[in-house]
Amino acid sequence: MKELQNSLQLDLVGLDDLGLEVHKNTLRKWYQLMHLGRLLDEKAAKYLKQNKGWAYHAPFAGHDGIQLILGLSFRQNKDFLFPYYRDMLTALAAGITPEEIILNGLSKATDVASGGRHMSNHFAKPEIRIQNVSSCVANHALHAVGVARAIKLYGGDEIAYFSSGEASTSEGYFYEAVNGASREQLPVIFVIQNNKYGISVPIEVQSANTRISDNFIGFKNLHIVNVDGTNPFDSWRGMQEAIDYVMNGRGPAMVHADCVRIHAHSNSDRHELYRSKEELEQVRKLDPLPRFRNYLILNGIFSEEEISEIEKTNELEVEVAAQKAESAPDPDPNSIYKFVVPEEIVHCPVQELQVLNEQENQSLPKITLREAINETLKEEFRNNPNTFLWGQDVASKDKGGVFNVTKGMLQEFGEKRVFNAPLAEDFIVGTAEGFSRYRDDIRIVIEGAQFADYFWPAMEQLIEMSHDYWRSYGKFVPNVVIRLASGGYIGGGLYHSQSLEAVFTSLPGLRVVIPAFADDAVGLLRCAIRNRGVTLFLEPKFLYNQPFTASPRPPKNFCIPFGKARIRKEGNDLSIITYGTTVHWSLRAAKKLKEEHSVDVEVVDLRSLAPLDKTTIIQTVKKTGKALIVHEDKLTGGFGGEISAIIGEYAFEYLDAPVMRVAGKDTPIGFHKNLENAILPQVEDVYEAALKLALY
C-alpha cells in the first residue's frame, strides 16, 4: 500500500488551494470518468466477442492519467482537439457521452463522429470541436499546426491539442509539424502517449531515445514536459505547465507521457507472441485505475462504499447507453453518395459566358494564361479578406513563385495573408487542411509544389483531404485550392514535366480542372476559390506566357461552373476530345486536316476532369461517329482510358470506327529536346492519328 501511495506522491500539488469540498468533487469526477472509461473499454471487448460490432478496438488501459487530463483540459466549443484511435477516455472526458462512444463503436448512423463511415474507435464530435481524424497515424499533427496558425493569425486564445502514440512520431510529417509550429511559435500542444510499443515493434527499434521527447530538445521555442501518464496528478501538473507556456504566446509545447500498454495493441493483435508473461504481469501491477482507487481510499478521501456507489452509477449509465445505442439505426446504403463533394455555388450568369464568346474574335486587349491567374487571385483576395496563399517561393520580395504567377501579391496583401512555407510539400498541404478548420468562410490557395512532379510527398495529405467531407458525414470540408504547374514541353526532363491528373481523378472527393486558355483560367479559378471543397487547379506551365492562350479580359465575377466542357471548334467528321496543352495541338491539327483533306474536325476542350462533362463527350461522338482522345500524360493509365470507357459504355452504337488515343509514351520524360519531342505528343502525331481515323 505504501508503494501505491508513493507512486501518486504528487497528489495535491495545485489542488489544495481549491478547498476541501471542491477538491473532493474534482477527485470524484476524475475517478468517475476513469472508471466509466474502463467500463466502456470492457464493453467494447464484449461486443467484439458477441460479434455485435466494434470491429476495431484499441484499449486505452495504462494511458488513463494522461487521457483523463487531456480530455478535461480541452475547452468544449473553443479549443481544437485532435485525438487518435486509442483516445477513448480522452474523448469521454472531453465531452463525448457514453452513448455516443458506443454509437461509434457499433458504427451506427447516428454516430456523431462519422455516421458509421469511419473505423470504430475513432472518436470525434465536430459540434464541440473534437476533430474527426483518419487512421493514418500522426498525420493530424499537421492539421493541429494548421489550425494553430489560424488561431494566431486571427488573434484567438484557443489551443490546438494533438494526441498520438510514440511510434507514430517516427513519421516524417510529424517532424515537419513540430518544426513548423516551433518556427511560427504556434499555440499547439503535442501530447505523446508512450506505451513502448508500435503494435509489436518495441520503442528501441523506433527511436535511439526511448523517451521520445528527447528527440526534439533542439527545436527552438518548443517547451517539453515529461510526465507519468499513468498518474493523473502528474499529468495534470505537466499539462498545466504546457498550457501556461502556450497561452503566454511563447510557442508550442510537447507533453510526453510515460504510459504502459496493459492489453494488446488492438483486437487483431496477439501480444503474447512478442511479450513475456513476466512483462505482462509487471504492467498489470501498474494499472492506473486500481492504483488511483486504492489511493483515494487509503488517504481517506472516499470510503469503499462511496467508491462502490460511483461504480454502480457508472455501470447503470453504460447499460442504459448501450440499450439506446444498440437500438439506433444502421447506416443507409443509399446514403453513400452524400457528402462526397460539396454542392457547387454558381456565381456566373450564363449570359456573361455568351457575351465573352462573341467578343473572342474581336481585337480587344488580351491577357495571357499567367496574367489571368495572377489577376484572378488578386481579385478574389480583394473580394474575401479571409483568403490566404502560401507555398514555396510564392512571397519572396518581388518574386512571385518560380513562374511569377503570384507576383505582386505579397506587396498588396501583406505577409499575414501571403507567405512562404518550408520546403515540405506535406506540411504545405497538411497545414492548409488544418487552417481551414478554423472557420468556414476561409479560402486557402496553396502552391502545392514548385512543379507538379514534386507533389508526391504530399499525396498522403491529399488523400486525407479527399475523404474529409465524406468521412465526417458533411461536418467538415477543407476549402482549399491546390495550384500546380503541370506538364512538359519546357525541356525540364524528370521532375519538371509530369502530368498528374490521372492520379488525382482516381480519388473520389476531389475536383480537377485544367485550363488551356486565359479566360478559362479566370473562370475556373474563381469558381474553385469561391466554392467549398478541394480543387486541384493544374496549370500547363508551357502555356503560361504563350500568345495563343491569350483571351480578352473576362467581365467582373466571370465564373465557369465545374464539369462543363467547351467546344473549341465545331465539326462533323470526327471528334478530338482533349484538355490542357494538347488542346492547341488538336486545334492546329484540325486546321491542317481541313486545309489539306477537307476533314471537318470537332475539338472538345474538357477543361474539367472531375467532375467530367460526360454529356458533351457522348453528344460529340453521336454527332461525328468517331473519337480521338488526346493528352500529354502517358498512354497506359492515362485519363484517356476513362474517356474511352465512357464512350464504349454510352455511345458504342454510334461509333463508325474504334476509339483512338494519342498520348505520351510509356516512358519517363527525357531532358534533351529530341527525347522530349519523341515522348510527348506533337501536332504531327495528332494530325496523323486523326487522318487515319477519318479514313477508317
Image: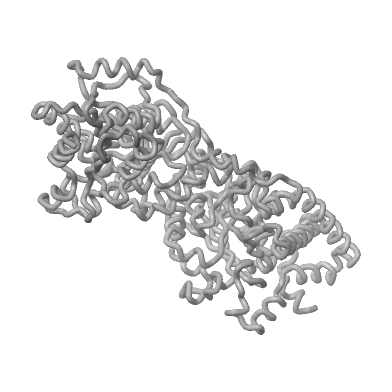
The quadrant the C terminus occupies is: top left
Single out the residue that lies furthest toward the left: 596
Question: Residue drawn at (45%, 35%), measured in percent from left and top?
Answer: 443
Count of number-bearing discs: 0
Q: Is residue 267 placed above or below 280 in the rendered structure?
A: above
Q: Is residue 501 placed above or below 543 in the rendered structure?
A: below
Q: Residue 521 falls in which quadrant of the image?
A: top left
- Which one is nearer the viewer's eye here, 46 or 50? 50
Whole-percent x, y for residue 116 in the image: 63, 48
Whole-percent x, y for residue 533 in the image: 47, 37
Single out the residue that lies furthest toward the right: 305
Model colouring:
one colour
The quadrant the N terminus occupies is: bottom right
Q: Is residue 257 placed above or below 566 in the rendered structure?
A: below
- Which one is nearer the viewer's eye here, 645 or 560? 645
Q: Is residue 177 placed above or below 552 in the rendered structure?
A: below
Is residue 72 in sight in this rendering? no
Whole-percent x, y for residue 660 in the image: 24, 41
Is residue 654 in sight in this rendering? yes
**In this rendering, position of residue 679 left or right of residue 414:** left
**In this rendering, position of residue 629 left or right of residue 204:** left
Q: Residue 331 falls in which quadrant of the image?
A: top right
- Which one is nearer the viewer's eye here, 8 or 322? 322
Whole-percent x, y for residue 478 in the image: 48, 41
